[in-house]
Image (cartoon, grey):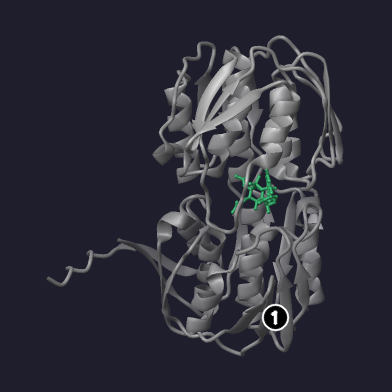
Amino acid sequence: MTVLRIEGGTPLSGVVDVPGSKNASLAILSSVLLASGPVTLRNVPRVSDVFIKLDLLRGYGAKIDWEGENLVIDSSELVDFEPTPEMTRLIRTSFYLLGPILARLGRARLPMPGGCQIGARPVDYHLKGLTAMGAKIDTIGEMYVVDAPRLVGTEIYLDFPSAGATQHLMATATLAEGITVIENAAMEPEVTSLADFLVSLGARIEGAGTSTITIQGKEKLTGSQFFIPADRLQAGTFLLGAAITQGDVTVRGVLPEHQTAVVNKLREAGAKASEGPDWVRVSADRRLRGIRVKTMPYPGFPTDVQQPMAAVLAMADGLSTVNETIYESRTGHIGELNRMGAKMTIEGRTTIIEGVAELQGAKVVASDLRAGAALVLAGLAAKGVTEVRNVHFIDRGYEGLESLLTHLGGRIQRIQEKEPIPLA
Ligand code: EPU
């Protein structure tokens, strides 16, 4: 069993180059199947969700090579493939393959997706959008059986600005006949990155990054070369690391406007922050004070930083509240942080945090990716030794987390523990 063993109490300090974005990569790796020529991607993070996605792409006949730092994918020839439910349930974005496969092959059979257990996470907006574009969708058990000999552009209104549905439908529309308009579209930077990638393939897209996206379909998309931007969520985690350990961290290679919500809430709590064209610096020389946080679609406070932020506020002076509006049950960190001495309770969608001066190291278990990040941050600031188990969740989205944190002065090691011998 893999364990992250953390000796807390050392302030994080220094400059860190942030790896490529997991969520932008996963969206792009679905859409890569739209390209009838080789695509070279740079800065793809080597995280387990990406490896799972590449396995799915291989199933569809894509040829995949790592050439040093470059990931080269050739989807010129695709084959009919039916992934197993065991494969698709490993990641949420397995479902975003549906539209591109339909656009290329006219039919698809895809089991329901999975991903971190943080809420119900239905796929109804995806299905409604594809249906509006002319797809005929049936289900057999957990399998979607979809036919669309021809996809046609249409107007789609999303009931909620879903990042995944916006990405999936925008990508699919690039090969539909005519014009598609997506209203109430998500404005997350990962949507814009995907649009930039699709445009590099020759797609015609306007308005990505706003709530109305217009796509003019084309008959064919070509190959291209594309650089995956830095992971804003990982950058946010490091900035919170500076705040919780009373350290001083600069994240480099990022766009400061992607950190606006996190940085402003940290400032409100008493941290200092500055920024340049491609960097953000956060430092804290004293205990932060309690604040109220509410997650919102971008440019609001990101749900993916909510759990790490709660860890920071667990050690702030006074009362804090963290209101999660995107997912119903992104709460797996709470019980584990309480084991470390935090005083957190939950009322509906709101975590109420009575700040404590000190956390104590403990043996804790990650329940999902961002809960894992929250526990690592808490461990870095706690007194004594923290051991985080279920590291595979953290490996879904943080490339080389322990080496980057070690570089910043954190005392964190990955160790392999012998499995306990089961009692007879
Ligand atoms: N929703 C529906 N119906 C749908 C689609 C979404 O009700 O058809 C709901 C969801 O249940 C959720 C809300 O809409 O309550 C927002 O979901 P969204 O579709 O925006 O999320 P997603 O595309 O499934 C991506 C990220 C998540 C991140 C969200 C929000 C990836 C692989 N995942 O998920 O990232 O929390 O956007 O920004 O890009 C993570 O990285 O830890 C993670 C969970």
Q: Is residue 157 above or below residue 146?
A: below
The x, y position of residue 16, in whole percent, is 60, 56
Residue 272, above or below 172: below
Q: Quadrant of the C terminus?
A: bottom left
Front residue of this view, candidates 102 and 260: 102
Mark 1 Cα-neighbour bin, 10 Å: few <14, some 14–19, many ≥20: some
Say whether residue 16 is left or right of residue 47: right
Position above or below: 365 against 304: below
Question: What amino acid type should be assigned to the residue bearing mark 1?
Answer: Asp
Circle 1 — which element?
loop
Tell whether 200 sits left or right of 357.
right
Give the quadrant of residue 318. bottom right
Question: Can residue 47 be seen in the rendering of this structure?
Answer: no
Which percent across, then down, holds residue 294? Answer: 77, 67
In this rendered view, identify the residue nearer to me: 121 or 232.
Answer: 121
Quadrant location of the N terminus? bottom left
Residue 217 location, x and y as percent? 78, 16
The residue carrying mark 1 is 285
Does the residue tagged 1 have its C-beta within 8 Å of any atom of ligand 1?
Answer: no
Q: Position of residue 313 (x, y in %)?
A: 67, 78
Residue 328 in view, yes or no: yes
Q: Is residue 297 left or right of residue 336?
A: right
414 or 303, nearer to the observer: 303
In the image as oriented, which residue stretches furthest toward the left? 424
Q: Nearer the viewer, residue 341 or 39?
A: 341
Q: Number of marks in the image? A: 1
Q: Which residue is painted at 81% across and 40% down in the image?
A: 185
